[in-house]
Structures are given as structure tokens and as C-alpha cells.
Amino acid sequence: MTRERVRSLLTRVADGTISPDLALDDLAKEPFESLEFATIDHHRALRQGFPEVIYGEGKTTEQIVAIAERIAERHGGFLATRLREDAAAALAGRFHDIEINALGRTAHLPGATPAPVGRGTVMIVTAGTSDLPVAEEACVTAIALGNPIARLNDVGVAGIHRLLARRDQLFSASIVIAIAGMDGALASVIGGLVRVPVIAVPTSVGYGAAFEGLAPLLAMLNSCAAGITVVNIDNGFGAAVAASRINHN
Amino acid sequence: MTRERVRSLLTRVADGTISPDLALDDLAKEPFESLEFATIDHHRALRQGFPEVIYGEGKTTEQIVAIAERIAERHGGFLATRLREDAAAALAGRFHDIEINALGRTAHLPGATPAPVGRGTVMIVTAGTSDLPVAEEACVTAIALGNPIARLNDVGVAGIHRLLARRDQLFSASIVIAIAGMDGALASVIGGLVRVPVIAVPTSVGYGAAFEGLAPLLAMLNSCAAGITVVNIDNGFGAAVAASRINHN
Amino acid sequence: MTRERVRSLLTRVADGTISPDLALDDLAKEPFESLEFATIDHHRALRQGFPEVIYGEGKTTEQIVAIAERIAERHGGFLATRLREDAAAALAGRFHDIEINALGRTAHLPGATPAPVGRGTVMIVTAGTSDLPVAEEACVTAIALGNPIARLNDVGVAGIHRLLARRDQLFSASIVIAIAGMDGALASVIGGLVRVPVIAVPTSVGYGAAFEGLAPLLAMLNSCAAGITVVNIDNGFGAAVAASRINHN
Amino acid sequence: MTRERVRSLLTRVADGTISPDLALDDLAKEPFESLEFATIDHHRALRQGFPEVIYGEGKTTEQIVAIAERIAERHGGFLATRLREDAAAALAGRFHDIEINALGRTAHLPGATPAPVGRGTVMIVTAGTSDLPVAEEACVTAIALGNPIARLNDVGVAGIHRLLARRDQLFSASIVIAIAGMDGALASVIGGLVRVPVIAVPTSVGYGAAFEGLAPLLAMLNSCAAGITVVNIDNGFGAAVAASRINHN
Amino acid sequence: MTRERVRSLLTRVADGTISPDLALDDLAKEPFESLEFATIDHHRALRQGFPEVIYGEGKTTEQIVAIAERIAERHGGFLATRLREDAAAALAGRFHDIEINALGRTAHLPGATPAPVGRGTVMIVTAGTSDLPVAEEACVTAIALGNPIARLNDVGVAGIHRLLARRDQLFSASIVIAIAGMDGALASVIGGLVRVPVIAVPTSVGYGAAFEGLAPLLAMLNSCAAGITVVNIDNGFGAAVAASRINHN
Amino acid sequence: MTRERVRSLLTRVADGTISPDLALDDLAKEPFESLEFATIDHHRALRQGFPEVIYGEGKTTEQIVAIAERIAERHGGFLATRLREDAAAALAGRFHDIEINALGRTAHLPGATPAPVGRGTVMIVTAGTSDLPVAEEACVTAIALGNPIARLNDVGVAGIHRLLARRDQLFSASIVIAIAGMDGALASVIGGLVRVPVIAVPTSVGYGAAFEGLAPLLAMLNSCAAGITVVNIDNGFGAAVAASRINHN
Amino acid sequence: MTRERVRSLLTRVADGTISPDLALDDLAKEPFESLEFATIDHHRALRQGFPEVIYGEGKTTEQIVAIAERIAERHGGFLATRLREDAAAALAGRFHDIEINALGRTAHLPGATPAPVGRGTVMIVTAGTSDLPVAEEACVTAIALGNPIARLNDVGVAGIHRLLARRDQLFSASIVIAIAGMDGALASVIGGLVRVPVIAVPTSVGYGAAFEGLAPLLAMLNSCAAGITVVNIDNGFGAAVAASRINHN
Amino acid sequence: MTRERVRSLLTRVADGTISPDLALDDLAKEPFESLEFATIDHHRALRQGFPEVIYGEGKTTEQIVAIAERIAERHGGFLATRLREDAAAALAGRFHDIEINALGRTAHLPGATPAPVGRGTVMIVTAGTSDLPVAEEACVTAIALGNPIARLNDVGVAGIHRLLARRDQLFSASIVIAIAGMDGALASVIGGLVRVPVIAVPTSVGYGAAFEGLAPLLAMLNSCAAGITVVNIDNGFGAAVAASRINHN
């Protein structure tokens, strides 16, 4: 509510056009009524080329398909994550050019106009083969949001030479997504080697005291390499969106 | 030894100003220096663009001063964090142009050649006044690493109009550091508003069930706004380094 | 035990009608024997129109049907929650006018005399589509207990304009039940907007570090908006009963 | 600025006592005021019926006094909680009619126009003497927000007759705040006895496995008495605000 | 090793019968070699009438049957707990007079000579119907070990009159086993009423924040009624053995 | 007022020594007495054979002395636990024959009529010297409640011969209280050796991952020796009351 | 990078053979380029006779078989752990002389040249029959790595004579692996008896508050017997590798 | 009494230097000695090669000195850990040749006959300067138990070249003790480099979400390098004893 609108309101109170009580009601709501930015926010989605992403967990197949249809209609395409097999199959049956990634549990229907390409390459690195489903989710998301990607798989620190031998590839990245379960140490070692942003993704891979990803989560939050940031356990999607925010900055 | 100083050294070798042997002596001290109790990583400045930062927690005042002297000698300046009052006083007595930040518990001795300036502004936002010490640590670190900063204080979501009224300032930032204790909800709301990278810092502010920052930490890791990344509890330093990695990308 | 009853007891000891030992036994039990309020409590259930609600978890289908029959006989109807599919089917087969809610996992047999209607409207708000089962449980319970309800779905803070655009609806409520998983931030934002009671329900929706609802539970307990209260994870039933206590106050 | 003061301002505009421009100047300071370290939410009084309360934890004495002065200037009075002794002393020295509660760690400066009185009595009940500081905080807050209160102290379930003997008092309440550490069982027993809203406050009282209030917190969240709601550990303030929301509904 | 045996050993060293090294070996092992109590311990099992109880979890059906056969051969009967359905069926097929309790997941083959009867009655009390499986395990075990039992079911504190109305039964018990999930408050209330030993059993019954029994476990450990002891979550077996130790004391 | 004193009062009514009215006055003060800050449960002595014990934690010295005076007046003596040094000193100054135990942090004023003696000896065993404060609290409490005690100190399983060598002493006990920090293994070994009731007390003794007693608490709850029961961390008082309930059964 | 290589690099800069910028790039990478030890590490695997072990969890059957083929080709044999039934079957179908251990969920294809035999015997001890799967994994691994093994099963401390009676066997071991769930006390007792290395393995065996192995894990980390080390929950594989490191030291 | 002293005693009996009765008197004091508050395990030296070590935490200075005197008398020397400053001062005043380590909080009085020397060198490695107190405790203990040691300080993986540059030193060790807080990643990297036993010690160093050492503890338990074992948080003593068990194997 601008200064002018408040002055106008008060003038109407002064000349009796509206009662003090009505003006009170109006003022009490005010800080929110002035917020037309919500529409702007909607435009931002249009500009960036990615509308709301469908999170499949806890939704029925019918709900997922219905939401997908609405988004596809408005934006030409969509991305869905954490899909059960039946939901993925239903989407595959409904949309022609859809790309299903079974390991990553995603479905991507590219829109007519692809997302603008970001400034550099997002390098997606895994500590072990068991981290692959999370890496797949990150890859599909990064690509959907317009980011060139590269991959390094199974280079955990138990055999650190595997990582060091590929440091040229690592140094060529603009952003690194480091995916690891167990001790999560891969993120710290990478964070100490490169100067670009490192986004760490703990995975729920490991024996009992990994506690479904708690161990690498805490390790990554406590990385001795400064300036590493962390996303939720198994959240390849979130890491890719964070990378894309950086890459389109 | 900063990247700039090595480049200058090599240039002087190339143009004959100094001999290879003299340059060798200088480089040979790299990449690390062993005190009895510490192995200073002088090479870090080369790899990551800034020398090793002194983490004051768990070190004696004597150790802190000794390490600071070695780094200042090699790099012209240094940054120290988490300083007890006596350690800060000892550094202030030892180094002339040092800048002490009591609230943030930091000491910064700027080097002769300032760090190169990053691409945009780092906006540091707090939910409440009690989060200020963490914000101070982040500000001092961001500045030391060559990042223009801006600030928004005490704009937590309990009165969301305080934040929304300043959304123009928020939209002007290249990177946002969102600092909050209690429910950590500030990070989610900001993450939903802006398109730039958002780094969330949970703080140990709050009643009992905040469990020393666990509540906002978990909330931020689970932010419903996609692409937010998180650092350790009260880790303003780490957030600023992460922001600087992005800003100098 | 009133003063008179104690005097009478002592008099009977004095005249030898009863022995000291018998009187001792009687006195030792006393504080409970005076409690005829238990019957009153039973009357309260009658007056409020809702007898004991059947919690289906951990009960066999036979036990559930048998309890339902006894309550229906005494009160004309009943409410059952957390029903497995087979238990819901058994109840549906046994009671004619029963209303089964598959998503909310409830069964409601309305009594002959409906519950008295509360003073205002209970607004049930969800952050996302995945929170719907909990919202359904809350709705069915609120209606069964005689509360007019309204609903706002999928208005989480990741797109805060969705909530703000509907603030007139929000302001029309007497009580708000805010249901959210992940960061639980919806409850804090609503708590800062409205002046009426807000009951927060954390849900078990979210990636790994949501820890089955722990993250939103802690966030809601630590809400920076003062005066929010919280119920158990996924406990839509409890939230609705709490709302009904307020609404019939 | 309280809702009452805005209404009065508007009435004076309506009857010509002050000009719209003067009123505008006054309102323009709303809805918040920026100190360097705090953004005071003056609008809160309008939205929620009472001005922002000062949370003393983590703030310097100077910050607390400065914020208190701003709020007192605009609203005539203020409430501050979680005060260290020196902060309480500084406020006592600065404000004449202030009421300091040492046990509850609060300071209250009543405004010129007292808050409107709620519909019923808030009964504040403790399980043991060690819970008193939390109860004091709740009492001071409830009174400041315009709620008649009553008290029952040290009536934990280890001697349940202490509670049952006073059930008439308990039944006379409009809202019950049940404060208990250890097993938190008091809340469940009260919740089973009364039909009015019950707000449970876990306290950090108890031997080791109470884990600073975790035990009663979990117990209260799992109360077998339906419709109890819970606030944060030791959060007497939050419980009283919640009660006041209900009482002024 | 008695003083006499050591003297004899030393004498044999002195007269050269054995070498110092052999004596050294003997002395080094000594504290364990003197422990013939292991046999005595075996006698204890015989005297008490209950040999090792078979814990079915994590054992194959073949292992369970084989162990049962060996124990039955030596002692005439056995008790097995935590049996999967197939293991129970296999035991039922193998042993004629075996008693299977499906709800409690136990199998009991009474021996020829029943266990000696304890001094009093063990009262097994549950808060709700969902706690019955644990109560069944406790009952079968208590009976197998020679303890008269009595039962009170579904007397949780949400309707405390249910418990108080039966206090005569409660007072007649020698030992009370209080079984409850959720808030575990039943144990505290009983502990405050009776003077006999109370053994509390938390169960894994309850909504999310019960965390599989953690909530009642902590509540019971923190009971405000002094002198309550606690066993593991859902451990009806352990509670009954503890009661039997008391009852045969 | 102890059970003995009530019996004596009633006997004097029966034989005409005092009138019913005088007895009534005396009993009427029962069952509890309200101080402003405490509701003393005088009836507890009747119900459970000993008056309410004063728990010093979280109470001011003035409150402790005031409560002690009331209980001493009615019952002739009292027991107080968890006393700060100043509170112990104040009690020592106020009551002549009081016994202060500095290590156990208790104060005991024996009443005129000692508690009736239980059936057997309570053996209090510690794993290490660091567990002594908890053992002292248990000893003082057990004695105050009328239980003969015996002690075994520093016999943890790291040197299991220390325990085994004294198994005769161990076998002579009626009840064993096993006190241990760290791994809590002492309780399991004792539980496997003796047939009498074993009450395990975890202590907060140990390195980091003992987590203030969580490690031995969980270990004891999971004891492989069947029929061990557990009390709260460091709760020597609770263990002794539990033992006394058994010993006076 | 040796001193000589740096001198040569600098000389080439001095004589213009390479530019300062190229030298800078080289120096910046340097600490890693000097690491040809990665190849050496590969040789170590060859020398020790055990290449990378295949961890079956989270890998598809196809991935497992493919990795196994590659390792078998290079090293003549392989070891795989944590195999689902279908993966074990696929390996059994593919490799002729493979040894499948269903209980331990392992597959072992011995290489042509067996691993060199370690210095002593690894004794693998379990507390109960339910710990056998973990013991099997340890046995298979220890044998595959060239370690003679011995076994003691079901000697938990609930009947400590079972362990003590076999102390000669225990004393004959070079290294002990102590496997236990529940209270994990077996490790402490063994650690107090023997002087050789003891590796403790907590298992996920036990009632509720074992929390999937957390209880024995914490107990073992807090063992009162000094010098016990611990591996992850259920990690028989890791314990055997640790033992083999010791045994081949 | 060390193993050597017993052998010498027996030899003197064999050659008639002392009579069996005198030897008996000496041995009879074994295997333990009862102070009022402690049962010193003198036999431990026989069983495990070194006498009982005094753990200072939770013991009074008087108790510590008294125990030290008894052990010194019997064994010629002693080791004490976790000493408060006053306890260390008291020991220094009482014993002449004692060695106090203030940083490590230890006191060591070497015995007349030094412990036999182990087979190889124990390399003690720290990630950072803040880990030094734990390393000191480990060093003092290792030396006291007869182990040659070497040290590498401040070589955490944030600058991995610091570690790699010293790999020759690392490869020369027989056993490695890896000490790290924060992410604990040092242990994994070392475990992947060396083939000898690695004992990991998590420290309580780090920001909030290190949770007093929980983060590195979990990371180390989940190390991706196979065969690493772990001791308790900050337990340098335990790690050294474990290393000594291996080194004297």
C-alpha cells in the first residue's frame, strides 16, 4: 500500500465517505494486499523455463497425471520426480515424447522451448555405484533446467587415486555435485581440491550406523573443507536445482 | 602466498628480475609449513584464492598468534574466526591494522593486495536480532574474500510484511545468505521469492526443542522451496565462503 | 470423603462399631473413594455428543467391530480412525449409514442427534497435496464433533502468493489447522498473519532428513510466530479434537 | 500501536480533531521501524492485538533497552521475557512503573489502555514446585494480554488426590495450561478430566533421561487424552499467547 | 582358588615338583578356574523350574525346533517367545501338549513338575486394547514361571475413572505390571496409588512422535511416582520375569 | 503422618484417650497442605509407607527449608535429595539431628519412629569409583525407608574376577541395585548370576559417546539377562525406593 | 613433485620455453600430480591377494555380475557381500567354483593363488544364535583374506559360565571378534579377559530400545575394558578386514 | 604386580631365596585390593601386561592420590588420565619422577622395569591443531605401554597434499591412530592408503552439528575404507591401548 493510497483512504475517512471501522479493516490487512509480486513470481517460472516440479511421493497416480496435464498444457512440458512404477507407466502412456528414467525414478516431458543454457558445466560425482539413483535424479533435473552436465562415477576416497587421476575433469567443472553415502568423505576431499561451488548430497547408502543417511549428512555439514553446502538426504533433485540457480546467476 | 603473488613471482623469473634459484627457495617453502602443532596449508591460497583461515576454537592463544604470524608473513594478511576474547586481544596487540569484530568473534588483517572482487552482492539476512553474531561472522568473511555485501536484519516470518516490504533490496542480490534459528522458516520463504542461490544458516537460537539449532537445521534441509543449500549450525563463516565460491565462479 | 463422613467414621471407631484397623483401611483408600466424578465424566461424553473414538491401529478387525457395536448401541453412532482396509470394509458391511473415507482412513456413523454446532469455522489448510490424508482425517473428525469447516489446499510457502492471495478466506476462520511436512513453515507464516488460534500438524512427508516428520514437528514447536500449538505427527484427529474443544468453549 | 489506538486515531480524523496528513505521518511510521540491529514489528499490535514482545535471549542489554524504548513510545507499554538479571535491572532503572518478575525472568510495563479482557479464566497448573519459573512466565504473559488467571501448584499425578480434590477449581476454567516436567503425565490426566482447551507445556525438569525436557515433550505430544496441544519446552510465554488467542477468539 | 590351593601350588614350586613357568600359567588363569559356580547356576535353573527361554526373533524355524527339543528333553518343557507364525506352527506340530498364544506370539510346553508358586498375585494392567499383545506375552510368561495373575485391560488415564473404579482389584495385587504406549502415563498414576512394586512396560503403540515406543519409555523412566522400574519397549516377557524374581524372592 | 502414627491415633480414639473431634482435627489437615508454591502430599505416608521426599533440584533454599519444616512437623523427620551445598547447609543449621551426605547430596532427618524393617538386605553394587555419588544417594534412601544394606564397590566387568570373588556376598542379598556407567555391563553379568530382583541404575559416567548416560541406559534396557529392571540415569533415589517397595512387599 | 622437477620448471620459465601462465597452471595442480602412488596402491591389492570386495546393497544384479566378471578376470577370484537371493543365484549360475553362504549373504570365488596366511587365529565369538548371520559374513571374509579362524557361539553373559568354561579356547586366539546385540556386554567381558586385540561388532538384534543396534554400538564404544575397538552395526565384513590387517601386520 | 614380578617371585621360590609362605603373603594381596571406595585390579597387569590405569573423571583428588599410591607400591609406577589441574598438581607433589602432560591431562610415573617394547611404531595423526589434547593422551598412553611412536599433526583432508606429501612416513608405521573431529574424513583417506591397522578416534571438535563428536563418530563407523575400527569420542587413551594390544600381539 503506497503512501498515496493511505492518504486517499484517510481523506475518505475525513470526508465521511467511509467509516473509521471500514478503514481499520483495510489497514489491518494492508501489508499483504500490496503484494502483487505473486504474479511476477509466476512470470519468473515462465522465464526460467521450468514450472513447478511434481513431487510424486505421497500422491496418487491420478493426482500425478492430473497435475502433469495441467502443467503440460500451460508450459508445454514438465518434470516429475520420485515416481512409483505405476505412476511412471501412467505418465508414459499419457504423454508421447516423455523420457522415463527408471533408476532415477523421474519423468521428463521437454517443453517446446528448451530452458536457457547456464554458464558452465555441472559435474555430478558419486562415491559408489550404490549412489547412482540419486545421481540420475540430479542429472535429469539439471538437464531439464538447462545445464550441461558431466559425470564421474565410483570415485570414493577408499581408493583416492581414482579421484585424483581424474582431477583435470574435476577442474573443468563450474559446479560440482558430490554424492556419497557412508562417511560422505568424498565431499570434503573434493571441496579441498576445487575452488568452484560444491554441493554435497548425502545418500542413504550404508550399514546400520549410517542411520539412513544421517552419518554422511552430519559429516558433510561438518566438512573440514570450507564453503561446502549440503542438501537433504538422497535429494539429487534439490542439488540440481541449487546448481542451476548458481549456473544461471 | 596468493595466486597473484605466484603469478608475479613467475613473471619476474620470466623477465629475469630474479633467478630461478631464488624463486625456487621461495616456492620451496610451499605448499605447507610445519609448526610443531600445526601444518599450515600455504598452498590453499593458490588452489582456492584465499589463504588458510585460522579457526580459533580449541587452540591456545599462543598457537593462534604463531599461526597468524606465519600466514601474515607469507600472504600479507589473514582471517581468524571463533576467537576467545583473550586471543582477539593478543592479535590486536600484535598486528597493527587488524580489524576486530567482537560480536562476530573475528579478527581480520587485510593483505596488501585485496582479494579480487566477485561478480555481485551477497545479501546477508537475519530472522532476528539474536542471530546477529552469526551474521557478523558471515559479513567479515565475505568482505575478506572480496565480496560486496548488503544486509537485512530482523525480518523473520512472524511479521512477513517486514520481509516483503523490502523485496526490491532482496531482488537486487546475487546471492542470499539466510540466517535463522527457531523454525528456520525465513530460508524457505526467501527461497520461494528469489531465483538466485540461497545459502541457509541455522542458528542455535531458540527454546528447548530447538535443541541447539537442530530444529532450524532440519527445517532448512527440508525446505519446500527447491534448491536451497545448507551449512552447519551457526556457521556464518562457511556460508560466506560458499557464497564467495559462487561469486568468483 | 467429606468432613462429615470422616467424623462419622471416627465416631464409629470411638464407640467400637468398627475397629481401628478397618478404619485405617478405609482412610488409606479415601482420596479415590470420594471421586464420583467418573460418572460425571461419562455424562460429559453424552452431553458433548461424542463418545470414545475408536483408534484402529493395533486392533484386530474383530475387536474394532465389537467395540463399534457397543458404542453404537449406547450412543447411536461412532467415529473410527486409522482403519486398515479390511477393518473399514467390515464396518461398512456391518453398519448401514456409515461413511467411509478411504484417504483419511476413517469411518463415521452419525448418531441420531448430531453434535451441537460450535461457534465458528475451522479452516483446514495444507502445504501440499501429499498432506491430504492427514487433512481428511481432521475434516471427518471436525465434522463429526459438530464443527463447520472450510479448506485451503496446497498453499505452502514455496509459492507464498498462493497463500496470501487467499488471505480473506483465512481471515474468516475462527480456528486454523495448519498441516505441513518438510519444513513446516506454513504454520509460522499463518501464525504471523492471523490472530485466531492456530493448531499445527506436522506430517511425515519429505525426503530423508525429515525423519518421518521430526523436522516439521521441531520447526512447528519452535515457530517464531507466538502462540502456535502443536499436535503429534500426522495427527489430524487430535488437531480436530483440539479445535473442537476451542470451538465449543 | 494497538488496535485501540488506531481506531481512536481514525475516529479523530472522522470528527475533524486531527487532519488526514497528521494521521498519515503517524501511520507512516508503521508497520515497522528499523533500528540498526532490529526491525520492530509495530504492525503486530494491529494484526494480533498486542505489540511485539521482546525476547531477551541472545540480545545485549543495550539492544533490549533500545527496543523497549521504541515500543513503549509507540504503544505505551511492553512485555519482555527471558531477561538476564542485568537486563532486568537496566529496564527497571529506565522505566518507572515496570513490573519485574525475577522467577519468571520477565519485565512488563503496562500500557495506558489495558488490553481488552478475554472471555474466561486461564487456569495455570504445575506438576511440581520446580516448574514454577515457567508458570510465572505464563502468568505474567497472560495478564499482560488481558486474561484473568487462576493457579494450581504442585498437583502432579504422583499424588493424584491433590489434583482431584480441586477439580471444582479446574472445572471453572475456560482454558487450562498444564505445566510439567519428568513424565508430563499431568497434561494427560487433566485432558481426560476437562472439556475445555488444554495447552501442555513440557519443562526441562527431571533426572538424566528427561533429556532437558524431551521426555515430557514426547509424552505430551502422545497424550492418550485427545485434543491436547503442546508448545515448546519451558515455553510458558507461548502457552499464554496461545491461551489468549483462544480467550479473545 | 583358595588360600590352601595357592599354598600347595607354591610348595610344589619350592620342592621342584612343578616349574615356575607352569605355576605362572596356572596363577594367570586362576580367577576363572576357581569358578565352578557355572554348574551351580545350572542347578538354579533346575530348581526354579524354568530353563533358558527361547527367543524366536532372528532364529530359523529349524533352529527353534532343535533348541526346543533339547530343552524339552532335559527339563520336560519349555517357553518360546517372539515366534513367527511358521515357527509356532512347527512347534505345534512337533509337541503334543503345547499351548500356542497367537496374539502374544508365544509357545509354552508345561513341564511335568510345574514351577513353584510365588507369594502373591501379579496384576497385569493395560492402557488400551492395542497393548494386548504385550500383555499376553507377559501373562504367558508369568504363568509359566509359577505366578498367579490377574488382569485389568483398557484403563488408560484418558478416562481415569476406569482405573479408579477398580482400585480394590489394584490394591489386591502383590506386584503390578503397567503396560502402556503413547504417553505412558498409566504407570505414573498406578505408581502413585499403590505401595507394591510396579514394573512399567512401554509399548510401540502411538502416532509418529511416539517413535516406536521412545515416548512412553522416556516418560516411564521419568515417572514422578518414585520407585517405578522400567523394562524394554514391548518387553512383556522381561517384565514377567522381573515380577517372578520379586514374587519368588 | 506415617501409617504407624495413624494407627496409633485410631487406637487412642478406640480406647478413649482422645476424642473423635480431636482426631478429626488432626486428620483434617490431611491429605495435603498448600504452601503458596507447593502442595505437600502428607497422605503419601499413608499410601506408600513413607512421607513425600523433597527433590532439591530447581527449588530455592527457602522453599526447601519451608517444605522440610512442614514435613518434619507432621511426620517427625524427612528425606531430601539433590541438594545444592547451600541448601544442605541451611537444613543442617535448621535441624539438629540431621544427617548430611555431601557425596550423595542428601539430607536425612530420622523420624521418632523408624520405618519398619524390610525382609532382606539390599546390596548396592558399583562398577567404578566414579559411580559413588549415585550409590550414596541410593544407600541413604534405602536406609531411610527401613532397609538393611550392604555394599560392593568398584567391581566392574573389566576385571570380572573382582565381582566373581565376592559372589557369596552377592548371593546373600535379597535385592541387588547395580550401578554402572559406560557400557552398563555390570547389570547384565549380575542379572545372570543371581535369582533375586536386580534394579539397574545407569550413570552419566563415561567418555563422549556415553551421551550423559544414554549408553548404559540403553544397554541395561537391552540386558541379555532376563528380568532386570531399570530406573532413570543417576537415579539412586528411585532405585532405592523400588528396592524398598520389593523389600516391604 | 620433487625439488628437481620444480627447478627444471622454473628454468624453463627463465629461458622462455614455457610461459609463466602455463607454469602457474602446473604448480597449482602439483601436489596431486606427484601422486603416482595410486598405481602402487593397485599393486598392494595384488600383493595382498584381495582386490576390491563387491558390496551388494543398492546394486542391481546385472551390475554385481558385471563387476564380478571384471574382478575375476583380473584377479582370478572375488568376494561379494550383502547379496540379495537373486544376485547370489546369478553369481552361482555364472561362476563354477563359487561358494555361496546363504546365512551370511556372501559369495566367494577363491582365486588361483590363495591369500598369504596371517600370523595367528581369528576367534569369532557370538553372544547368541540370532547373531549368526553377522558371524558368517565375518568368517567368510576372514577366510577369503587368508586367516585361520575358530568359533565360539552363543556364549553371551546372561550365562557367563558358558564363556568362562571355554577360556582356554579364547586364550588361544590371536585376535577376537566379539559379536553381540542387545547390551553388547560380551565384548567388555572378553576385553577384560584377554590381552590380544578385540574387535567388537554390534548387531541389530534386540527388542525396541535396541534401536536397530544403537544400544550395543554405544555400549561397545563405552566398554569399561580398555582397548576394545568397534565397527559398524552388523558389519561382520569390516571386522574381518580389520582382523586381517592386524593378522598380516 | 607385573607379569615379570610374578615370574621373578616364583623363581626365587624355586631357588629357595624366599619361602613359599612369604611368597604366599605377597600373592595373597592379589588379585585386588579393596579401598573403601575402590577395588584396585592388581591382577590386570598379569592378564593384560599393564596395571590398572586411573581414570580421573568423577573421582576426588584424595581418591586419585590414594589409588595411585597403592598401584605405585605394587607395580612401581602408574598412569592416570583425565586429571583435573588440582589432581595433577597433587600427584606432582606426591611423586618425584612423575611426568605431567597438561594438554593431554595425564600423569605418568614410569615403573622400575619399563614395559616390553612392541613390534613396530604407532603413528599418531591429527586432522587439526584442535585435536591435539586427544593426541597427547594417546601418545602418553602408548609410550607408557611400551610402544615407539611417531607423529603427524594437522594434516586434515581440506588440504590433502599435506597428508600425501608425508606418505612415506605414513607407510613406515605399524599401526596408525587417526584423530579427527568435524567430518572425520582423515580416517577414511588414511584407511584407503595404508594396509596396516587403522584405529580412528573421533573428537568433539566442530561447529554445532558435530554434536560433540557424533558427526565424526558416525562417519568413522561408516568409513568407506574397509577394516577401520573406531573408539569412543576423544578417547585417545583407548586408541593407544588398542594399538598396544596389536603391537604386543
Image (spheres, coloured by chain):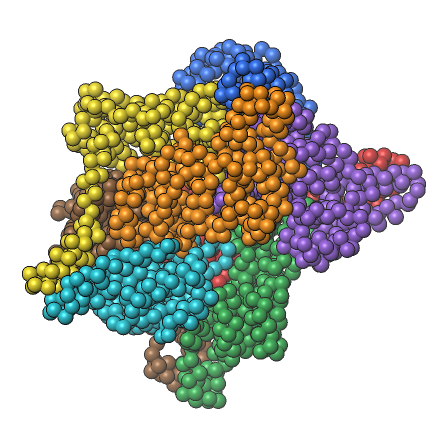
Chain colours: A blue, B purple, C yellow, D orange, E brown, F cyan, G red, H green
Q: Which is more toward the observer, D224 or G92? A: D224
Q: Is residue A141 above or below residue G121?
A: above
The answer to whether residue F112 of the structure is visible from this angle is yes
Q: Which is more toward the observer, H169 or F1? A: F1
Q: Which is more toward the observer, E178 or E55? A: E178
| Quadrant where the N terminus of chain E is found in the figure | bottom left
x and y percentages locating residue G29 in the rendered image:
74, 39
Q: Residue at x 42, y 72 (%)?
A: F93
Q: Residue at x 6, y 61 (%)?
A: C17
The answer to whether residue E118 of the structure is visible from this angle is no
| Quadrant where the C terminus of chain E is found in the figure | bottom left
Total residue callouts: 0
Q: Quadrant of residue A141?
A: top right
x and y percentages locating residue C48 in the rendered image:
25, 31
Q: Which is more toward the observer, B248 or G53? A: B248
Apparent side of residue C18 relative to residue C231 in the rendered image (left or right): left
User: Residue lying farthest right?
Assistant: B16
x and y percentages locating residue B193 in the rendered image:
58, 25
Apparent side of residue D183 relative to residue E135 in the rendered image (left or right): right
Apparent side of residue B165 relative to residue F100 in the rendered image (left or right): right
